[in-house]
Image: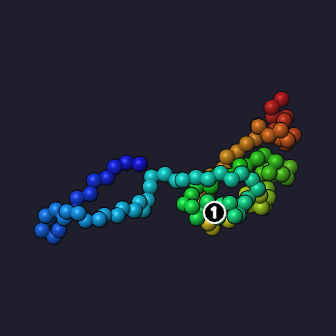
Amino acid sequence: MGRIRVKVEDSSGAPVPGCTVQAKQRAHDFLFGVFEGSPYNAPAFTAAREAGFELATVLLGWNWTDAKSGQVDKTGIERTFGISALGKLGYTVKAHGVVWLQQYRSPLVAEAIL
């Protein structure tokens, strides 16, 4: 937010009094973000995108992303979080990992804590 001062002049440089001016912001220096949680909720993310949000944060819980014996489950990630679908909606996607705070964490994580 800020102020803008507009000076309207005619072709000779003389001020034009009483004219109406409209301004529309076309770009900004940061992304407006939304967090919907998991699993992917197409209607919610679509509505947020139509409202102008550009950044989607997905919650990458440990058991949702490391479901196959220590191997990253790319198919499961796509199914759960809709990363490709978010990209097709025009979002920039960022992940927020919650590993240590899940009460149902993986045995691999439990061993790492001990």
Q: Residue at x 63, y 67 (%)?
A: 88
Figure coloring? rainbow
Q: Is residue 18 left or right of residue 75?
A: left
Whole-percent x, y for residue 74 in the image: 76, 58
* Helix, strand or loop status at disc 1: helix
Q: Residue at x 72, y 60 (%)?
A: 41
Whole-percent x, y for residue 5 in the image: 27, 53
Q: Amino acid at mark 1?
A: Ala
Q: Is residue 84 visible?
A: no
Seen in the picture, residue 46 relative to 30 is either above or below; the reply is below
What residue did someone put label 1 on?
47
Q: Residue at x 40, y 62 (%)?
A: 24
Q: Which residue is at the front of the view, 59 or 23?
A: 23
Q: Quadrant of the C terminus?
A: top right
Which quadrant holds residue 99?
top right
Whole-percent x, y for residue 23 in the image: 36, 62
Q: Which residue is at the front of the view, 44 or 71?
A: 44
Q: Is residue 112 left or right of residue 92?
A: right
Which quadrant holds residue 16?
bottom left
Q: Is residue 26 left or right of residue 69?
A: left
Whole-percent x, y for residue 90 in the image: 58, 64
Q: Residue at x 84, y 35 (%)?
A: 110
Q: Is residue 59 visible?
A: yes
